[in-house]
Image (cartoon, rainbow, N blue to C red):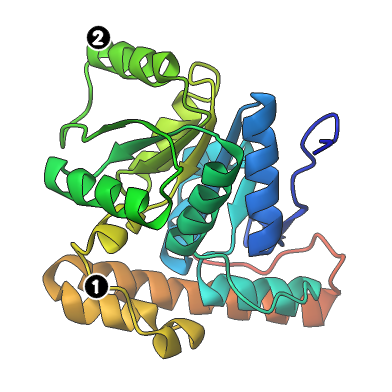
Amino acid sequence: MTLPLTTVWPVRHDVFGVKVSATRYDEVVECVLNAAERGEGGLIDFMPAHLLTAVVADRELRKRMDDFSIVAPDGQPVRWALNRLYNAGLTDRVYGPETTKRVCAGAAERGIPIYLYGGTEAVLATLTARLKEWFPNLIIAGAEAPPFRPLTAEEDAAVVERINASGAKLVFIGIGSPKQEVFAHAHRESIHAVQLCVGAAFDFHAGAKKMAPAWMQKRGLEWLFRLTQEPKRLWKRYLVANSTFVFLYTREVVRRKLFGPNSTRQLPSPTL
């Protein structure tokens, strides 16, 4: 296979101040695998609606996300916004757990080693077994479950050393948002691999958490399914995030109707 000289990442559009990639599964997978084969770095994220609203409200996190190579529309509402605001023509979202399987399939075919960083020891044990069952040729160069606390400087340096020494060219990070995005960005120079922030993909593929039915995913109702599974933990997230997303979307549609899609004029709004 002849690869281009350097990876050309998908185009990104401003969605409420956050640059989101107008992209599809096949483009994401090909870009990630090509960058890994060349030994290039890269930061890949999967953006659901609740994370988008969190990034909008956090200037420092938004600046970090600007440095990402791909910020894929993980949530259906994010895809709908890209289509409505930019005529992106996207027929499906780019879901982190599904992309994880597709990238692993491609890595197995091309002999690209991967590293798993996140979850618990039990989740990782099940996940690695299932990945090897699904993709027998997949090279899992390493897997570790970090502590549920900030790493010390020494621990952080040791993690970087282990990942780089493993020879992995793809690092899947599943430590929750926005912690995983902050981790990937902080190590964009020190970890010599493409880093993919895949959220709950570890738990889903290990069977530790249930995935929403396909019909709910398609209709943008995954949040409702997850809320029924973990109401005490997630009720506030979705109450605030969903309301904020609807507000931001409505404000942007109205702004464009009043001033035109190319205008930089903004409507007054409360501080998020």
Considering depth in this image, is 160 or 81 the residue closer to the camera?
160
Residue behind mark 1: 210
Q: Residue at x 43, y 56 (%)?
A: 54
Considering depth in this image, is 129 or 205 the residue closer to the camera?
129
Q: Type of residue at label 1?
A: Lys
Q: Is residue 84 visible?
A: yes
Q: Residue at x 84, y 36 (%)?
A: 2
Q: Position of residue 136 (x, y in %)?
A: 41, 48
Q: Is residue 255 visible?
A: no
Q: Position of residue 202 (x, y in %)?
A: 30, 53
In the image, which is nearer the foreground, mark 1 or mark 2? 1
Q: Earlier in the sequence, mark 1 or mark 2?
A: 2
Q: Position of residue 161 (x, y in %)?
A: 37, 12
Residue behind mark 2: 154
Left or right: 69 as drawn, with respect to 100: right
Mark 1: secondary structure: loop
Considering depth in this image, is 57 or 237 the residue closer to the camera?
237
Residue 172, picture quadrant: top left
Instruction: Examine the rendered structure and indicate whether residue 91 appears above or below residue 234.
Output: below
Quadrant of the drawing holding the N terminus: top right
Q: Type of residue at label 2?
A: Glu
Q: Residue at x 47, y 68 (%)?
A: 49
Q: Position of residue 115 (x, y in %)?
A: 39, 33
